Image (cartoon, helix red, strand yellow):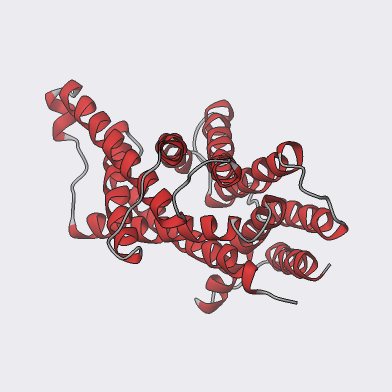
Amino acid sequence: MDLIPYLPALGAALLYSVQFTFTQYYRRECGGSLFATFLHTAGYNAVGFLVLFCIAGFRIRFTPLSFLFAALGGIDCIGYVYCSLRAFSRVNLSVYSLFSALGDLVLPSLAGLLFFREDVTPGKALCFILVAVSLFLTVNREKTGSGRHTEYLYCTGVFVLSGMGGVLSKVHSSMPGEKVDAASFAMLNAAVAAVVSVVLLAVVCAKQTPEERAARPKLTARVLGSIAVYGAVNKVAFYLLLLGLAMLPATVQYPLLAAGNIVFPAFIALALRQKPTKKELLSLLLAILGIVVLTMI
């Protein structure tokens, strides 16, 4: 069986697994205020645009249709980052990852089934179930943060906005009409998100009191570095997902992405000599089984 079509989704899952480290670091250093959010989205999208511009051979294409979907995706990206930074102060990483991965798993897959008439095969159905169970096993139920209503409000935002990014990409790839290539679409997405973030950042700065200005997070070399690395990793991962959509249906790519988001962090933890629990090992085995089922059946 040809495994090449599955490589972009697995590569994206690996990169997305790495980026969580930089999001957590930025949240610890800068918090989750509107100023911190728009600073982060402006910076990482600008860096991501430059990285993709180099990958594309210093070229970018434009069509009105692609720009519309890229703009919607860029706005979705800003909302996702804001909800992520707020959620990190209220729930642990495993709960946040569950909502993010389930959004990636459920919404694009449902869009593929309901609107694009993608087939439901035994392999797809079994993989979906295995990955969903695996995700729930990763949750650490230790309570963190404040009230449940607030924490799950932001987690619901993470779920919806994470999944909507995949839905918008799927709809764009399936639309008739002239469209740009994957790299150009990712660059348009980054450009819109960066410009909108800069405008919103200027508005926030203009409305800040002297006390709020004095309390702004310090932009150390490590903070700026975390923004830059996050931008490069995130946008290359998005580019790989767009490449994957040209080769795989959404009902295959996004369950594979969710499974990869379980498998790769587990292997990273093992490489760092972090001893997994029995639940984590079972979750890992179910995710690997889901990948095998999806690619073989």
Name the residue nearer the viewer: 121 or 36: 121
| Relative horizontal placement of residue 220, taking residue 135 as reference (left or right) | left
Name the residue nearer the viewer: 271 or 8: 8
Q: Can residue 125 be seen here?
A: yes
Residue visible at 27% across and 57% down?
A: 50
Residue 1 against residue 164 in the figure, above or below: below
Q: Position of residue 141 (x, y in %)?
A: 64, 47
Residue 59 against residue 267 in the figure, above or below: above
Q: Residue furthest front?
A: 177
| Relative horizontal placement of residue 81, taking residue 254 as reference (left or right) | left
Name the residue nearer the viewer: 135 or 289: 289
Q: Quadrant of residue 256?
A: bottom right
Residue 14 against residue 74 in the figure, above or below: below
Residue visible at 61% across and 44% down?
A: 174
Q: Quadrant of residue 155?
A: top right
Q: Where is residue 180 in the image (x, y as percent from the top left)?
A: 44, 49
Residue visible at 31% across and 51% down?
A: 44
Q: Quadrant of residue 275?
A: bottom right
**Exactly how many numbered labels are in the figure?**
0
Q: Where is residue 282 in the image (x, y as percent from the top left)?
A: 75, 66
Q: Can residue 229 be seen here?
A: no
Q: Where is residue 149 in the image (x, y as percent from the top left)?
A: 57, 26
User: Considering the image in quadrants, where does the N terminus appear?
Assistant: bottom right
User: Considering the image in quadrants, where does the C terminus appear?
Assistant: bottom right
Residue 29 against residue 16 in the figure, above or below: above
Residue visible at 61% across and 50% down?
A: 101
